[in-house]
Amino acid sequence: MEAKKRLKKGERSDIRRDVRDVHYPGSAGLIRYARLSLRQREKAVKDEVPHTYARATARYVRMSPRKVRRVVDLIRGKKLEEARAILKYTSHRAAEVVAKVLESAAANGINDDRKNMIEDQIYVKAAYVDEGPALKRMLPRARGSANLIKKRTSHITIIVGEKNG
């Protein structure tokens, strides 16, 4: 029987990055890895060609991740034009930031010489929001006490791919 090798810290982050989309129902992203074991999933992610997708990230956005996720869930799996229209008419503060990240990801795919994506075939392959560091503020209360207020930040990542056909 072969001894199981313990994954190093750097190897685990690759897996986490991929698994993030799996728990979303209807994720058009990397859902095919959901039923694989950690080792199989790690190998599958490394085998995926990096020229088949483009990504963009906005970090330390001063919005609560929970609220930004509501907007990101609307565009996951949609075509680029449809996602742009949804974000344009979504009356939420986060829609503007998510639209910027989406445009950046699309531009990364179109303008990169190795990727050469066609704008009509681009779709949102994966989109997720991670929690960034929280700014901690004190709110004075009665009798000299204080409550802690957490002003949360978000890291928004959008990965676009090309749909053939």
Image (spheres, helix red, strand yellow):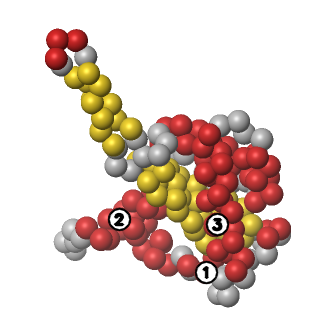
- Which amino acid type corresponds to the residue marked 3 in the rendered image? Ser
| Residue found 49% across the figure and 42% down from its top | 63
Residue that badge 2 annotates: 13
Measure how far apart labels 2 and 1 are at the Cα level. Answer: 20 Å
Q: Which image quadrant: the N terminus?
A: bottom left
Question: Which is nearer the N-term, disc 2 or disc 1?
Answer: 2
Measure how far apart labels 3 and 1 are at the Cα level. Answer: 16 Å
Residue 89 visible somewhere in the drawing: yes
Question: Which is nearer the N-term, disc 2 or disc 3?
Answer: 2
Residue that badge 3 annotates: 104
Q: Which image quadrant: the C terminus?
A: bottom right
Q: Relative to 13, is 88 above or below?
A: above
Residue 31 visible somewhere in the drawing: no
Q: Mark 1: which secondary structure?
A: helix
Number of disc labels: 3
Residue that badge 1 annotates: 51
- Which amino acid type corresponds to the residue marked 1 in the rendered image? His
Q: Mark 2: which secondary structure?
A: helix
Q: Residue furthest bottom?
A: 113
Q: Mark 3: which secondary structure?
A: helix
- Which amino acid type corresponds to the residue marked 2 in the rendered image? Ser
